[in-house]
Image (cartoon, coloured by chain):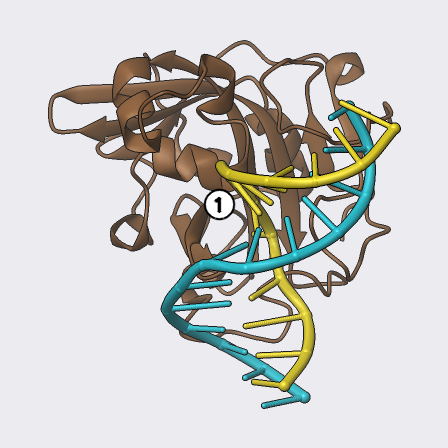
Chain colours: A brown, B cyan, C yellow
Amino acid sequence: MTILPLAFYQRPTITVAREMLGKIFVRRIGETLLSGRIVEVEAYHEIGDESSHSHRGRRARNDIMFRDGGHLYVYFTYGMHFCMNVVTEAEGVGAAVLIRAIEPLEGLEVMRRNRGGDKRDRDLANGPAKLCQALAIGRGENGLILDGTVVGAADAPAVADKDILVSSRVGISRSRELPWRFFLASPWISPGRPSGRIDAAPSP
DNA sequence: CAGTCGATGTACT
DNA sequence: GTACATCGACTGG
């Protein structure tokens, strides 16, 4: 298993977002390995994106988002959920890619226990807060380096451009027009979402 | 299936 | 006060 180097993340955010699809997210808890194939992501950027946490400048809450690419940015939302991003670009740039869904590959029974017992495989990690719960990612994991020690992404064959679907992002009200959600035609993506189109997305 | 709504902490107006 | 990068329970068809 080859863990993606930190340089992978230190590139334009849209590029990283598209190339994250198909990679294997890995999470180690002691001897236990949890992993899954990334099937749905969204890009967020401080420039021209009013929905990004970084849009109003660097603060205590979003500080990790401004670090150099290769950190994990975890935030707490709706009073009860965590979501996780991989930080992109260079130190001082507030940009990241939200991981919205993975196809569980290893450690399904641990994920099921983390999720509360009787969930179907499809419901283990098909949403940004669900996958954080399945992988036991919360405040304590904010700021970790994606070097594979505790979290990281393993390389996998690139997904062809023609297989990358694009849409507007889910659950935001501002900058809704930006086509910055990228996903695969997969049963493992988050539920109830509009089908996408195949298209190129502009960079900030 | 689709639509509605409550839960519940934190940042910001 | 209000909004929030969400989820799950519940309703009605």
- Judging depth in this view, the residue of B12 and A146 nearest the camera is B12
**Residue topped by disc 1:** A85
Q: Position of residue B8 (x, y in %)?
A: 40, 64
Residue A116 falls left or right of residue A8: left
- The answer to whether residue A69 shows anywhere in this view is yes
Q: Position of residue A66 (x, y in %)?
A: 48, 62
Q: Mark 1 lies on which chain?
A: A
Q: Where is residue A31 in the image (x, y as percent from the top left)?
A: 11, 21
- The answer to whether residue A91 shows anywhere in this view is no
Amino acid type assigned to the residue bearing label 1 in the image: Asn
Quarter of the picture containing the N terminus of chain A is: top left
Q: Residue at x 73, y 65 (%)?
A: A50
Quadrant position of residue A80:
bottom left
Q: Residue at x 45, y 16 (%)?
A: A120
**Residue A97 vertical position relative to residue A187 in the rendered view, above or below:** below
Residue A14 falls left or right of residue A63: right
**Residue A182 vertical position relative to residue B4 in the rendered view, above or below:** above
Task: Tell me the element at label 1.
Answer: strand
Q: How crowded is mark 1: few (under 14 residues within 10 Å), some or many (20 or more)?
A: many
Residue A90 falls left or right of residue A29: right
Residue B3 falls left or right of residue A98: right
- Judging depth in this view, the residue of A51 and A199 nearest the camera is A51
Quadrant position of residue A135:
top left
Count of numbered badges drawn on the protein = 1
- Judging depth in this view, the residue of A83 and A50 nearest the camera is A83
Q: Position of residue A19 (x, y in %)?
A: 60, 26
